Image (spheres, rainbow, N blue to C red):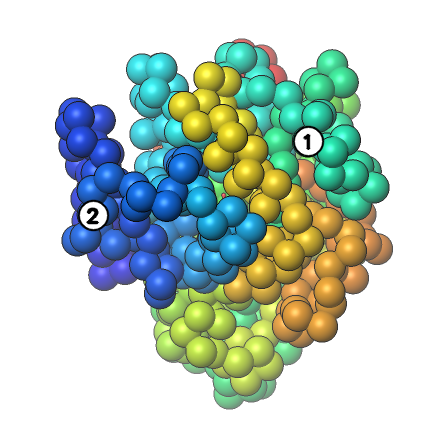
Amino acid sequence: MMRKTLRIFGLVLVLALVAAACSSSSEETTTTAAGGIDESTTTTAAPAAMTDEVEVFSWWTGGGEAAGLDAMIVVFNKMYPNIEFVNSAVAGGAGTNARAVLASRLQANDPPDSWQGHAGQELIGTYVAADQIEPLNFLYDEQGWLEVMPETLIPLISKDGNIYSVPVNIHRSNVLWANPTVLADAGVEIPTTLDEFFTVMDTLKAGGMEAPLAMGEQWTTMHLFESIMLASMGPDGWQGLWDGTVAWDSPEVTKGLEDFAKVLTYTNSDASALAWQDAGQLVLDGSAAFNIMGDWQEGFFRELGKAPQTDYVWAATPGTDGNFMFLSDSFVLAKNAPHRDGAIAWLTTAGSLEGQDAFNPVKGSIPARSDADRSLYGEYLLSAMDDWASNRVVGSLTHGVVANDSWKSEIDTAIGLFLIDGDVAGFQAALVAAAEESG
Ligand code: GAL
């Protein structure tokens, strides 16, 4: 249902974009107060008081994500009342649709002024490699951001001394979300190891729960894959896959893939038809006990008015405690941005303390900046801040940190085939080939 709505929503947005591109008038989509985009009303020409505009492209159209973006737009409007914010978000979890739309716009030399990109290989291996974005060192100097952005993040958004984006947050990918009532009724605890995870899910299945682990469409399978590989291989094993110190044909990868295959046997058969929010909803409803998803899931739960500890609980994905698999959303400045000043204004808001402290508590992420006001954040996010500061940090595959787009897309194809044939040896061979071709 949610997925269908999002699809229609995405389609409307794509059509709106096409219509806007074909028309000589300045019709644009606008942001609603409730979050998201109001595709039913369009504004003709910018109001007279507006002297500039900025078109910002993201995939934050639902869950807590649109609401988080809206909270930051409020700060932007306060900081720059004369610049119109044009929200060109395209629906589709984890950027599945948005990034395709963005790619064709970039190819047609029609870039949005600023767009969402993940820190790491997605940014460096795609947009920097294609010379599509401008360095932002001048803004870092002007705003003193090197003093407040995490040292671990700067290399992931830099190439040859140039810094290419403004990180707005840190998300954690390896989180297990659980329904506390389901666990209590079954007399089981939150599992902390993969073996415990299997045992608990066997108990739930024996009690009549068909699919204890809720999963959604294919990118969420890759999301599950990265968590289980981290659990099975440990942080050195996982990182080694990306820096070349661990071979993809090694026995530890085979073991990881077998564990992943076993985890999949506990998932719902209609996964491919569900968005990540739908999978989260299965946990809230008690139709499933668990979902492994990034902490934007908590933004969604909170937007629904659900309460931590009562409606949902969390832990690191079993077997990954002490490790923080991270990703970071950041915004870039397009080369030849149609509204360069507007884009710089937007990036200034995105990197500001006020912008980050408005956005993150709603989005369900912790701020990239280290000087956030902790009193604004809920229980889960405070625990994420502490873990970010103390855990071993490793990078996400699904969300752009460790592999460039072509490598990730080959892995995605291998996962798609594996979902159909379940052949571990064939899956491993495809992963070996992907690393050879694109790694
Ligand atoms: C990720 C992104 C998150 C969230 C998620 C689901 O790629 O980094 O901020 O948007 O997709 O849509």
| Residue 150 seen | no
Tell me where residue 118 appears, x and y as whole percent. Answer: 56, 36
Above or below for 243 versus 88: above
Specify the quadrant that holds the C terminus.
top right
Tell me which amino acid carries mark 2.
Thr
Q: Is residue 103 above or below residue 357?
A: above
Q: Would residue 85 be visible to someone looking at this image?
A: yes
Image position of 200 (left or right of 239) = left
Q: Between residues 104 and 347, which one lies in front from this camera angle?
A: 347
**Residue lying furthest front:** 48
On the image, the x and y values in percent for residue 365 come to 60, 57
Say which of 318 and 34 sits in front. 34
* N-terminal-most mark, 1 or 2: 2
Relative to 99, residue 259 above or below: below
User: Residue 208's spot in the image, x, y percent?
Assistant: 38, 77
Q: Residue at x 74, y 14 (%)?
A: 160
Residue denoted by label 2? 42
Write down the residue under mark 1. Answer: 139
Residue drawn at x 19%, y 53% is: 41
Quadrant location of the N terminus in the rendered image:
bottom left
Label 1, ligand 1: CB separation under 8 Å: no
- Residue at x-position 41% and y-position 35%: 52
User: Are there few (<14), some (14-19), or many (20+) residues within 10 Å of tag 1?
Assistant: some
**SS class of the residue under badge 2?**
strand
Q: Nearer the viewer, residue 251 or 96?
A: 96
Circles 1 and 2 in contact, beta carbons < 8 Å: no
In three-dimensional space, the C-alpha distance between marks 1 and 2, rounded to whole angstroms, equals 33 Å
Q: Is residue 358 above or below residue 308?
A: above
| Few, some or many residues within 10 Å of mark 2 (<14, 14–19, 20+) | some
Q: Amino acid at mark 1?
A: Leu
